[in-house]
Image: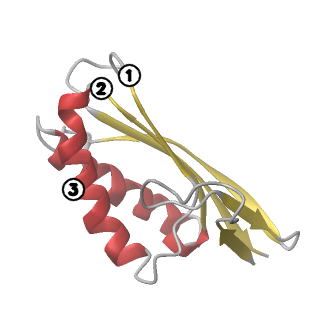
């Protein structure tokens, strides 16, 4: 079981995430490498962060499916956006995706940082993930 919660001893989350997640011992941990805004054929989903972020979340969903899991098994997300100008597109895609993935608002812990650049100049978003799959 994955338990996510926000203790009253710290401020409420500033966005769609939980402060804590606990995974019971009867789960296998799966690490997803940072996903960027490419389509399955390797082409860039678009030049804008909205298109790329949508592709990132679609890639994460495909990887979870390949591992026999779904978004409900996500334990943690670590997101990187290459410049504050790309935050609105990223946040729009994240809001759309989280509404589908976590309709009850039981969000995994998440970190979002703004970086100077990603591995290639055209990339605007990258997201790593950690999931826990019941044995």
Q: What element carries label 3?
A: helix
The quadrant in which the N terminus is found is bottom right
Give the Cα distance between marks 3 and 1. 19 Å
Q: Can residue 32 be seen in this view?
A: yes
Kindly identify which residue carries mark 1. 115
Q: Residue at x 72, y 59 (%)?
A: 9
Q: Which of disc 1 and disc 3 is earlier in sequence? A: 3
Q: Name the residue under label 3.
A: 92
Residue 109, picture quadrant: bottom right
Label 2 packing within 10 angstroms: few (<14), some (14-19), many (20+): many
Residue located at (37% from left, 68% from top): 98
The percent position of residue 118, horizontal first and vertical second, equals: 35, 22
Front position in the image: 60 or 3: 3
In this view of the protein, which residue sits in the foreground, 61 or 7?
7
How far across and how far down the image is residue 18, in percent?
58, 62
Measuring from the top left, give residue 97's x and y in whole percent: 31, 66
Name the residue rendered at 44%, 76% in the picture: 102
- Label 3, label 2: how many angstroms apart (C-alpha)? 16 Å
Image-quadrant location for residue 127: top left
Q: Is residue 65 above or below residue 77?
A: below
In this rendering, the answer to whether 25 lies above or below 60 is below
Q: Can you identify the residue that label 2 sits on?
A: 82
Q: Are marks 1 and 2 in contact (CB under 8 Å)?
A: yes
């Amino acid at each position: 079981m994955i338990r996510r919660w926000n203790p009253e001893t710290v401020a409420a989350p500033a966005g769609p995430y939980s402060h804590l997640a606990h995974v019971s011992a009867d789960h296998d941990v799966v690490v997803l490498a940072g996903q960027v805004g490419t389509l399955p054929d390797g082409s860039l989903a678009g030049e804008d962060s909205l298109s790329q972020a949508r592709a990132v979340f679609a890639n994460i969903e495909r990887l979870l499916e390949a591992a026999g899991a779904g978004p409900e098994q996500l334990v943690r997300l670590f997101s990187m956006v290459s410049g504050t100008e790309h935050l609105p597109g990223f946040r729009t895609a994240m809001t759309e995706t989280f509404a589908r993935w976590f309709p009850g608002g039981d969000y995994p812990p998440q970190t979002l940082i703004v970086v100077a650049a990603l591995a290639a100049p055209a990339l605007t978003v990258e997201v790593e993930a950690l999931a826990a799959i019941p044995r």
